[in-house]
Image (tube, grey):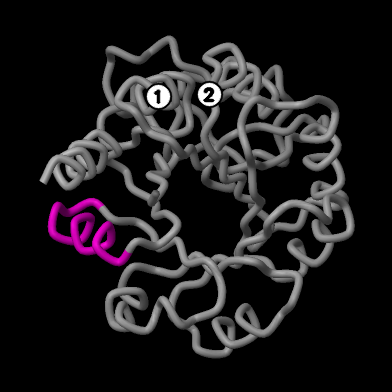
Amino acid sequence: MTVIFAHRGSKWNRPENTIAAFDEALRVGSDGIELDVHRTKDNHLVVIHDESVDRTTNGVGLVRDLTLAELKELDAGSWFSVDYFREKIPTFIEVLEFLEEKNFQGFLNIEIKTNKFHYPHIEREIAQVMQMRQWPFKYLYCSFSFNSLKIMHEEDPEIELAYLVKRNPFKIFIGRKAKFIGALHPNKLWFFKRVTKVPFFGKNIRPWTLNKRKQISQTFDQKIVGFMTDNPELAVKIRNEKQRS
């Protein structure tokens, strides 16, 4: 079955990468969750997409230049809606434990955000957190950084690694050829131009980010392993419609 990955949680109707967004994603029936991991000045792993806090909080500055205490003072919800003024930037472990408490048994896609700034040894730190207990869900790692994926292969060798790419032919080529990479996560434009060739690609394909009904429906018809969407509620609805037809 094609897995629906809620991209940064249910991003279309909740502030992205917050507990509220992940909670909503689970409520609507997502069987996949996607999130992004950065590291603070005092070496805490946190879940936020951008390198800075400017876009999704009431603060300014780079995540790597702020302590966890400073990040926790920020409002991570009001930029989206005043209804979510209590939302905070969650730590990585807070999200994992939230999913555990909800008995989430789907797939967690962990994006290592090292393509602009490299946080030394962040791969090891993420792997250690994931290996410290048996989680009820399955997980995989993805990154735009080929080097981070190479490092993660050493740190957590049994876990699938996915190379995030836009449309760069060389990056797609090396992602396809590298034996330690098990999947490609391409931009949807690349995917839909080659949709009939995807079954012969030789690796798992999970495109991003599919939000239109037609695109989501076409993707289910291809029976690929999964895709990212900002609107998991719509994707679940379409999948249910197809299963009934």
Residue that mark 2 sits on = 104
- Give the mark, 2 or 1, whose residue is nearer the N terminus: 1
Residue 13 percent coordinates (x, y): 26, 29
Instruction: Determine whether label 2 and label 1 are within 8 Å by CB.
Output: yes
Residue that mark 1 sits on = 26
Q: Amino acid at mark 1?
A: Leu
Q: Quadrant of residue 89?
A: top right
Task: Report how far apart the C-alphas of labels 2 and 1 lie in the structure.
Answer: 8 Å
Q: Could you tell me which secondary element the residue under label 1 belongs to? A: helix
The secondary structure making up most of the magenta span is helix
- Give the magenta range: 211-222
Q: Quadrant of residue 130?
A: top right
Q: Residue at x 80, y 67 (%)?
A: 150
Magenta span contains residue 218? yes
In the figure, 78 relative to 115: above or below?
above
Q: Nearer the viewer, residue 29 or 174?
A: 29
Q: Which mark is residue 117?
A: none
Q: Could you tell me which secondary element the residue under label 2 belongs to? A: loop
Pointer 2 local density, CA inside 10 Å: few below 14, some 14–19, many at least 20: many
In the figure, 88 relative to 166: above or below?
above
Q: Amino acid at mark 2?
A: Phe
Q: Residue at x 63, y 38 (%)?
A: 138
Residue 118 percent coordinates (x, y): 76, 57
